[in-house]
Amino acid sequence: MTDQILAGARVVTPSDVLEPGWVQIRGGRIAGVGAGAPPRDGTPIRDLGGGWLLPGFVDIHAHGGGGVSAIDSPADLAATVAFHRLHGTTRTLISLVSSPVEQMARAAGWVADLMASEPGVAGAHLEGPFLSHLRCGAHDPDHLRAPATAELRKLLEAGQGGIRMVTVAPELPGGLDLVRELVACDVIAAVGHTDGDYATCRAAFEAGARVLTHTFNGMRGLHHREPGPFLAACESPDVVLEVINDGIHLADPIVRLIVRQAPDRVALITDASAGAGMGDGRYARGARQVQVSAGRAELVGSGSLAGSTLTMAQAVRRAVREVGLPVTVASAAASAVPARLLGLDCGRIEAGRAAEFVVMTDDFEVREVLAH
């Protein structure tokens, strides 16, 4: 991005909204942020005409979009990233659905290759194959595997250092050992698609797991005598709780509950499948078929939810307009929290951070994406 000052915007900082505000960009990074009139130091000034200026979104869980599934080919992987970029996501963690280990390894290699040329790719997330048959959702049970260090190492080697997160059901035999192995390999361990109870999930978090995969989905619910994974995550101060805010996976009051119980630890995700951004129809999810009707993605033959049709921009808009979250909270959940989890230098509009932004309309529709 060229050196310039973005001015005349509602700038969403980590703690406030500057209205109007300005952001100075120098050398691809944020050099300064302020309220009111921008500095007059000879730097070109661009007036954003009162639009919302948010940090670029960071999606840590996306399988596809724009009609394609990321695990199918290198071209479809690149198309998935490009699709979400148009909707404000400047960093994408590509999620690979449970498939034969050889196919997952091959796709992890594609992600590593794309990372070398596309700075918007944050790496790969393996959602499987070490998941519970009882809570597999739209994952093909034929491709689920018992946790095994040898298979994990094969996948990590194929990913060439690009695998950043792996979801595990910790109650499976060897599950907690796999969590510890991931931590030792500096890979984020996530708890999900699990039938584990509160104690088991708490043990996983104490062993170093740092994410609850799509909270409340693919796991036990909240019960007054069986508190389940959600409360285990809430009581573990370093754990990030993923939220699919499409009005389908979670009711709006539940989203508000999650935010109240884990402030500053909620990450909005899309869990987007191939049908994101598309109309009603049938789309591939690995080797399985997904039917999208009125925005709801279901596995053909079972009716299980199969990802979402969300974009991050839609998730943010719903968070503000439907759920009623302050824009600073919604922005942090879409950017700062996931960026912090991955150790990225973006996600916040403050001096020193990478200059990655989404310009949005009054109604939180994407007007422009400004990034590398």
Image (spheres, rainbow, N blue to C red):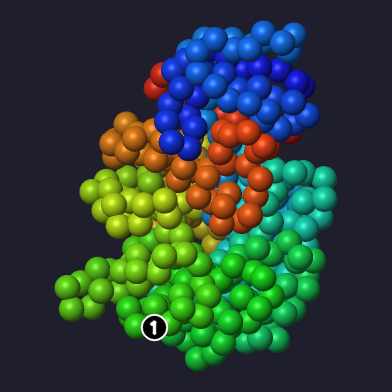
Point out residue 148 in the picture as x, y percentages from the top left corner.
Answer: 62, 87
Please state if 8 lies on the left or on the right of 215 as rendered.
Answer: right
- Residue underneath mark 1: 200
Dividing the picture into quarters, in which one does residue 286 lie? bottom right
What type is the residue that disc 1 sits on? Thr
Please state if 81 lies on the left or on the right of 140 as rendered.
Answer: right
Against 297, residue 56 (above or below) is above
Against 299, residue 130 (above or below) is below
- The residue at 72%/80% (across/down) is 153
Point out residue 325 in the picture as x, y percentages from the top left corner.
Answer: 32, 38
Against 121, residue 175 (above or below) is below
- The residue at 28%/36% (across/down) is 324
Q: Which quadrant is home to the C terminus?
A: top right
**Viewer can see residue 371:** no
- The residue at 70%/86% (across/down) is 150
Please state if 253 lies on the left or on the right of 170 as rendered.
Answer: left
Dividing the picture into quarters, in which one does residue 187 lie? bottom right
**Label 1 crowd bin: few (<14), some (14–19), many (20+), radius 10 Å:** many
Q: Which quadrant is home to the N terminus?
A: top right
- The residue at 38%/61% (across/down) is 215
Point out residue 190 in the picture as x, y percentages from the top left corner.
Answer: 51, 69
In terms of depth relative to the viewer, which is nearer, 367 or 260? 260
Point out residue 86 in the picture as x, y percentages from the top left corner.
Answer: 61, 32
